[in-house]
Structure formats: C-alpha cells, structure tokens
Amino acid sequence: MAQPTEETYDVVVIGAGAVGENVADRASRTGLSVAVVEQALVGGECSYWACMPSKALLRPGAALAAATAVRGAAGAVTGGVDVAATLATRDAIVHGWDDGSQVDWLEGAGLHLVRGRGRLAGPRRVEVADDDGVLRAVVHARHAVVVATGSAPTVPDVPGLAEVDPWTSRDATAVRDVPGSLAVVGGGVVGAEMATAYADMGARVTLLVRGDRLLPGLEPFAGEAVAEGLAALGVDVRLRTQVVRAARVPGDSRVRLHLGDGGSLEADRVLLATGRRPRTVDLGVETVGLAPGAPLETDDAGRVTAVADGWLWAAGDVTGRAHTTHQGKHHARRTGDVIAARFGGGDADGAAGGAAGGGADGAAGGGADGAAEAALGDALAEGPRLADGAGAPQVVFTRPEVAAVGLTEEAARRAGREVRVVDVPFASTGGATVFGDDAGAARLVVDADREVLVGATFVGPEVAEMLHAATIAVVGEVPLRRLWQAVPPYPTRSEIWLRLLEAYGL
C-alpha cells in the first residue's frame, strides 16, 4: 500500500462548497498558499443538491401560475409542467453533477484541490482518506485550518423510519422518476418548497407538520398564505401531525407511516425535511477538544473560540450562525479577509497582519497603529453581527413566495423592543393588477422609539426581487422619514413602500 503524501500550506480549508471556495479565494489574496479538501463535488450542496436544482424544479410551475393569472395570457396555457423538460433543465443547471468547471475556477484562482474526506488529526493537521477510508494524504497548515463542511439533514428517531429508505433533500432535488405519491415530513422551507415542486410535477403530496403552522420562523401570516397556496395545488397539509412509526406495506414497495392520532398514511416515497445539523461528525474535532455533532462556535472574525492559539477557524452552516448560502458566503468572505490580512502579505506580523490581528484578536499581532486596529475591529464587529441577526434575508420559493429580513413582530417584542407593525395588501398598488387578483401582502416591523425598520416580510408572486431594498433599510437603519423621500415608480408593486409608510402615518 502506498504511503500517504505529506504537504504543507499556509491555509487548509476543509470543504469546497460555496463557503469554502469563498474563504479560500479571499485568504489567498495576500499571497498565502491555500489547499482545499473536498470529498464530493467542488461547488458543494447549493450548486448540486439544494439552492440551484430546487429552484430549477420550482420555476416552471411559478411561470405557468404567473401566466394563468393574467387575462390575455391564460388562454395560451394548455397544459401543466413538462416534467421531462424540467428535469433536463435541472440537469443542465447542475452540469450533470460534474464539477469540472468549478475545479477549473478553483485551480485558476491559484488554489490547490485535495480530493478525499478531510478530518482534523490534531493542531494544524488534516488527514485525507479516500472513499474506502484509506489514508491518502496528510496536509499541514502553517497558520490556519478553516472548517467549511456545512450541514447535514437530520433523521428523526422514529421506529422503522431508517429502514424504509427515506429521501433527504439531496434525493428530492436529484430525482429521476417522480413518484406517484410523496409524503413530506416537516413544515419548514425545504418541506414547503418540495411539496410545491412535486405537486407541480404531478405527484399526490401530503405534507405532515408537527407544529401548528408552516414556516415557524417567519411571520404567521406567511405560513398561512403558503398553506393556502399548497392546498390550492392539491397538497394535503396536515398540521399538528406526528409520525410515530414507519414500515413497508406488506408485499408492496410503498411506505406506511403511522401517525400520532392513530391514523396512517401510505405513499410511494417519504421525504424527510426535518431540519439540519452542523456537519462535525466524523470530522476529527475530538482530537482538538471539541464535541462531534456540535456547531463550531466562533467569534465575529470566524475563529473557533474553544481552540487555543488561534489556528482553527470556521464559516457557514457548521458554525450554527449562518443558515443560508448567502449568509455563509458573507461569513466566508469576512473570515478569508481576516486570515489574509493576519497571516499574509510577506510580513505576516507587519502592518497588514498587525491590523487584522488587532481587529480579530484584540491585542494580538504587531506593528499596526491604534487607528488601524480600531478601524478593522469596527469593520469585523459590524459585518458578521449584522449578517447573523437583523440583516439576514431569506426567501421561500413557494407559491406565493415569501421574502423576509430582520425580526418578526414576535422576535422584536421578545427582544424587548417597542414596536409598531404595519400591514398592507399588495392590491393597494397599481402594479399589482398585472399579477392577478390575489397579489399578497407586506408587513413592516418598526422600532417605534427610533422610527427605523427592524423587520419586513413580503408575501406574493416574485417578491424575492423586492427584498433587497428592505435589507438595505434594515442594515442601514434608515430613518422612516428618509425612506419617505425614496419615491417608488408607478405603476409597480414596489409602490407598496409608499402604502406602508402612509399606513404608518407619514
């Protein structure tokens, strides 16, 4: 058996998804050598099994719905979603699950790819094994190891569930043959989106939700609207329903789910959409004193706080701080910038390195003056803090779509804020008429003491494209009276901003 190779780089990144790619790229910009370790596909979950393929499955139904809602266009719609064409588009978007173009980008950026499963094996040491578990390489980091392994689906501890070969989100987005019937367990974003997509593609869908509403992290009216939209698609939405046991139907390939109310349900396939956990199991974190399965807690710069000497860093889902690709990429850029400044630039402890060290680590680093330290410290504190909290946007690509940023009313009040809530239907805008009769609604959550926006939720067709204005208002803490000066064009649905501010009293 060949001996494992040994190599040393300034920085080693475990995980080549969107987060890992961004950390690696930014960390290399001051001349640091960077290796990226990846077992699966370069580009990661979002590119091949989550964000991109799921939206490819959802877009045809949304386009048909938009056309049928408009008189003059509805008559041109003579059928439903073309499943074969939809899956072909999905295949094209994921490049047939071939990461060649992503590898070309990574290597073109001067980054070194190490194929295999990476595990920590002590400080600054990463062991890389092949699919059979055979150790093939040992990669050492002079300065930093960054964990960007993302998250993995959780499987509920329900008797028999593991034995019926349930789908996770990866299976649902990579489907080749749409089942006749699908039971979706979980009422969060993945459950609601995949229930929509599979109903569009002709499956009989049952959505089983343990709680009393869909999308529990968002405003209640958003979950209610999505539940109504799913019901209109023919989805059987069952709230307050728990799966207590699962088994194969005798003499059949179908699955029988036994429910907490004593009833049962049969389906061709079962999709588990019951949440995700940080991917820190079988990562070797125990070799550096951390608990497998737990998130890697970091400071605002991305350094893992429980590990001494400042060599272990993390970004994205694995930290428990970022739950979307865009948040994870934001964290990745910030973390990569700090590593590049702290350790790179030829004189790692000189002006650039000292400035970053001062900002990320308090008094650590040398050579930077107090003004540089303070400036970088302020920047580091501002960016990740806002991305984690008030500035974190989210879109649910159901019908209707849900787009939200900042705090919900409940979260704002729980945080002790004095808030005012403003609700306005999109039907109050001239632009909404082109989207049909049921154009949705919008809500603002306002800090009444400061008269600034702390949260916004939009529900309706294609509201995702309206969200960034709200994100800017929340992150920038723009006073409502200043927002009043931003005149929306007529006739567009963005006129909802005028209606919301008028309803507030401006």
Image (cartoon, rainbow, N blue to C red):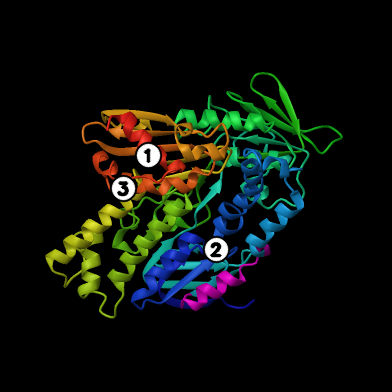
> Along the line of sight, which residue is nearer the eye, 165 or 356?
356
Left or right of 86 in this view: 322: left
24 relative to 261, above or below: below
Q: Is disc 1 surrounded by few (<14), some (14 to 19) or many (20+) residues within 10 Å?
A: many
Identify residue for label 1.
497
For label 2, the SS is loop
Q: Amino acid at mark 3?
A: Val
Residue matched to label 2: 43
Q: Quadrant of the C terminus?
A: top left
Q: Residues within 10 Å of mark 3 (few under 14, many from 20)?
A: many
Rendered location of residue 94, percent (x, y): 63, 61
Instruction: In the rendered structure, find residue 475 and report the number of the disc placed on it.
Output: 3
| Dot 3 or dot 2, earlier in sequence | 2
Residue at horizontal 47 percent and vertical 28 percent from the top: 220
- Seen at 35% across and 46% down, the residue is 391
| Residue 407 appearing in the image | no
| Residue 110 colored in magenta in the image | yes
- The amino acid type of the residue labelled 2 equals Gly
Tell me which secondary structure the magenta stretch mostly adopts.
helix
Nearer to us in this view, 416 or 286: 416
Give the magenta range: 96-111
Task: Tell me the residue at 66%/41% (across/down).
Answer: 72
Q: Position of residue 370 (x, y in %)?
A: 12, 65
* Distance from Cα at disc 3 to Cα at disc 1: 17 Å
User: What crowding class fits label 2: few (fewer than 14 Cα within 10 Å), some (14-19), or many (20 or more)?
Assistant: many
